[in-house]
């Protein structure tokens, strides 16, 4: 194994340390950018390696498969960059749809068409294979793992849009947060993406404002 892989590019990515708090794969994927709209906006998917690292972190692909993809990407950097562009387009689509729907709005027809197109493209290369006592979708390893990386996300987005979970969709009200999630709490009162981040920040701001008052 070469030295670059020994230093573990998968663990080095900030995408591999993101909170998986959304309760659905496609929403956690939408949350791979943080601080959206604010001065500290940060995109955790800056390179193809980040996409592979996040897919392992989120349980979408196995680690040995991701390492194999990194080897392929090293030999075809332009194709890897192009796949990252496709992934980011799918991520922004997931995020736009989630933000609109969480606010009770109607998605743009072009976004619904985009979701359907991503689903068709994912299924075009998929086969069904046994997975323990049930079956699951499988994609070929070619095309830098385009099927592995994007397929489960596109399918999950459609499953969210046509399923009962949609009623639980929320957006975090934290300032410049932009994360989305499903509220699976029994009383339906989950507010924050992560209490220790946006919740505590809001609490600290309220405390600060109280102290400033005469
Ligand atoms: Zn938040």
Image (spheres, grey):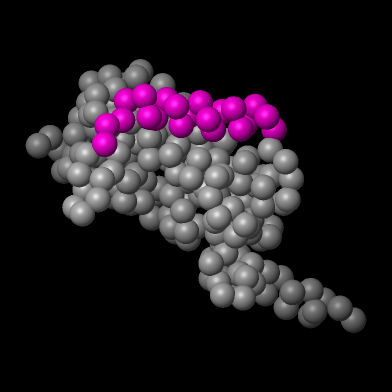
Question: Along the horizontal axis of the image, is 27 left or right of 174?
Answer: left
Looking at the rendered structure, the number of numbered marks drawn on it comes to 0
Residue 150 in view (yes/no): yes
- Residue 88 in the image, given as x and y percentages of width and height: 49, 33
Name the residue at 48% across, 29% down. 118
Quarter of the image for residue 154 reads top left
Check residue 98 for magenta coloring: no
- Classified by dominant secondary structure, the portion drawn in magenta counts as helix
The one nearer the camera, 10 or 178, is 178
At a point 53% along the width and 30% down the height, the residue shown is: 116
The C terminus is located in which quarter? Answer: bottom right
Vertical placement of residue 2 versus 177, above or below: above
User: At which x and y percent is residue 122?
Assistant: 39, 30
Rendered location of residue 61, percent (x, y): 28, 44
Residue 143 quadrant: top left
Q: Residue furthest right?
A: 214
Is 113 left or right of 25, judged from the image as shown? Answer: right
Question: What residue appears at the point 60 percent right and 65 percent down from the top-left corner?
Answer: 192
74 is higher (above) or lower (below) than 165: above
Residue at 50%, 40% (x, y): give it.
158
The magenta stretch is 108-128
- Quadrant of the snapshot with the N terminus: top left
Residue 52: quadrant of the picture? top left
In the displayed structure, does residue 172 sit left or right of residue 105? left
Q: Where is 205 relative to 52, above or below?
A: below
Q: Nearer the viewer, residue 186 or 52?
A: 186
């Amino acid at each position: 194994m070469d030295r670059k892989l020994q230093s573990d590019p998968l663990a080095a990515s900030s995408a591999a340390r993101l909170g998986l708090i959304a309760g659905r794969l496609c929403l956690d994927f939408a949350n791979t950018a943080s601080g959206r709209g604010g001065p500290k906006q940060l995109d955790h998917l800056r390179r193809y390696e980040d996409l592979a690292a996040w897919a392992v972190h989120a349980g979408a692909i196995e680690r040995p498969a991701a390492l194999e993809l990194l080897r392929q990407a090293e030999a075809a950097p332009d194709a890897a960059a192009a796949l990252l562009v496709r992934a980011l387009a799918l991520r922004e689509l997931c995020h736009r749809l989630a933000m609109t729907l969480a606010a009770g709005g109607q998605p743009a027809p072009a976004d619904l068409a985009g979701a359907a197109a991503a689903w068709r493209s994912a299924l075009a290369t998929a086969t069904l294979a046994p997975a323990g006592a049930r079956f699951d979708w499988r994609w070929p390893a070619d095309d830098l793992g385009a099927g592995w990386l994007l397929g489960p996300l596109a399918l999950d987005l459609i499953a969210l849009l046509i399923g009962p979970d949609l009623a639980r969709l929320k957006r975090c009200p934290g300032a410049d947060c932009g994360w989305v999630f499903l509220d699976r709490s029994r009383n339906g009162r989950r507010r924050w993406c992560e209490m220790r981040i946006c919740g505590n920040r809001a609490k600290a701001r309220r405390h600060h404002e109280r102290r400033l008052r005469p």
